[in-house]
């Protein structure tokens, strides 16, 4: 087992214990942290605590992580587009339509199943998502990094938390955002009315998305005005870019959850999924500290949609 100790900072004070655990550098997901709290493996100032208990600056957190049990996920050979690989990490260019890890309704056919067929060296840390440091939605394509051991996983999580991991996306949105370059700083949490959605909520977790206009397209017959944006994540909340852009009135074209009004326009462009692609990823290699950067061009379906816009504008 592994033991970890941390002191709550002023910035973390006032947060729920289960929400602050993933921020302490122990590489814990919130759900796994809740399991550890329930099992008495998390002590707050030397005593067992509740998941919803609020923490204060200076509080001492002791976490005991048991040895990970073998992951009962079946390897499934698939063609993976591996952009980079070493002893610590893999960088994958994920196609649209591929679920990242097993979940209810997706026990197989995921990226994790494919990774386990490619290598038996993936970080575990007691979760059912071996190797997964950050996720992409099923219908979002592009770059993500996978950890091959627990030390690499922890190092990548720290970079994510300290905002030294750069993640940029290209997205086609409805309308023309103003200003053309901006910052969306709005907390995100689970929508209390629809539990499968996220929403901007005063009680949500801090979330920041920077965007830059790449190109604008005017209204053309049955296709409304659109803008190609480059979005950079400063935090990593679930559905963050999709939620933030919908919140400012410019949803991602083709988004079936947050952009219902864009679906007709998406179909006019021959687009069968949301126009969102993880195009740039940069981080420090855990083994050497060397800074590496990777870029992924738009896949054919998204590039084809832009070509239709270019041809008619």
Image: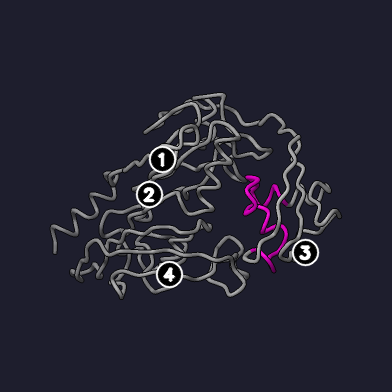
Q: Which residue is mark 4?
A: 184
Query: For the magenta stretch, what is the residue range?
Result: 12-33
The Cα–Cα distance between marks 4 and 3, rounded to whole angstroms, is 29 Å
Q: Which residue is mark 2?
A: 278
Which of the marked residues, 1 or 2, is nearer the chain's N terminus? 1
Frontmost of labels 1 and 3 is 3
Residue 222: quarter of image: bottom left
Q: Which residue is mark 1?
A: 94
Which of the marked residues, 4 or 1, is nearer the chain's N terminus? 1
Callout 1–callout 3 Cβ contact below 8 Å: no
Is 31 left, or right, of 117 in this rendering?
right
Callout 4–callout 1 Cβ contact below 8 Å: no
Q: Say whether residue 13 is magenta.
A: yes
Residue 112 versus residue 40 in the image, above or below: above
**Local SS, label 2:** strand
At a point 47% along the width and 50% down the height, the residue shown is: 137
Badge 2: residue crowd in 10 Å (few <14, some 14–19, many ≥20): many
The Cα–Cα distance between marks 4 and 2, rounded to whole angstroms, is 18 Å
The Cα–Cα distance between marks 4 and 1, rounded to whole angstroms, is 26 Å
Which of the marked residues, 3 or 2, is nearer the chain's N terminus? 3
Residue 258: percent from left, percent from top: 45, 65
The Cα–Cα distance between marks 1 and 3, rounded to whole angstroms, is 38 Å
Which of the marked residues, 4 or 3, is nearer the chain's N terminus? 3
At a point 18% along the width and 53% down the height, the residue shown is: 307
At a point 14% along the width and 61% down the height, the residue shown is: 312
Callout 1–callout 2 Cβ contact below 8 Å: yes
Nearest to the observer: residue 252 or residue 235: 235
**Local SS, label 1:** strand
The dot on residue 53 is: 3
Which of the marked residues, 1 or 3, is nearer the chain's N terminus? 3
In the rendered image, which quarter contains the C terminus? bottom left
């Amino acid at each position: 087992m592994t033991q970890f100790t941390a002191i709550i900072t002023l910035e973390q004070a006032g947060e729920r214990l289960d929400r602050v655990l993933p921020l302490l550098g122990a590489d814990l997901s919130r759900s796994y942290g809740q399991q550890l709290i329930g099992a008495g493996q998390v002590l707050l100032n030397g005593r067992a605590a509740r998941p919803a208990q609020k923490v204060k600056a200076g509080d001492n957190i002791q976490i005991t992580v048991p040895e990970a049990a073998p992951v009962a996920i079946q390897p499934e050979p698939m063609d993976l587009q591996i952009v980079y690989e070493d002893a610590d990490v893999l960088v994958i260019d994920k196609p649209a339509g591929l679920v990242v890890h097993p979940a209810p309704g997706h026990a197989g056919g995921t990226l994790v199943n494919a990774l386990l067929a490619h290598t038996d060296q993936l970080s575990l840390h007691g979760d059912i998502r071996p190797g997964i440091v950050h996720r992409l939605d099923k219908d979002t394509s592009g770059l993500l990094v996978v950890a091959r051991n627990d030390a690499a996983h922890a190092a990548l999580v720290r970079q994510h938390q300290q905002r030294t991991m750069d993640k940029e996306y290209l997205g086609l949105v409805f309308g023309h955002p103003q200003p053309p370059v901006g910052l969306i700083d709005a907390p995100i949490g689970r929508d209390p009315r629809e539990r499968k959605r996220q929403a901007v909520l005063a009680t949500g977790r801090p979330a920041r998305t920077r965007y830059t206009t790449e190109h604008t397209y005017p209204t053309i017959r049955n296709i409304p005005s659109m803008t190609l944006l480059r979005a950079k994540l400063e935090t990593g909340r679930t559905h963050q870019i999709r939620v933030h852009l919908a919140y400012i009135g410019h949803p991602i074209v083709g988004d079936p959850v947050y952009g219902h009004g864009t679906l007709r326009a998406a179909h006019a462009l021959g687009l069968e999924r949301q126009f969102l692609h993880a195009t740039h990823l940069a981080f420090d290699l855990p083994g050497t500290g060397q800074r590496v950067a990777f870029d992924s061009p738009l896949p054919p379906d998204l590039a084809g949609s832009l070509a239709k816009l270019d041809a008619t504008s």
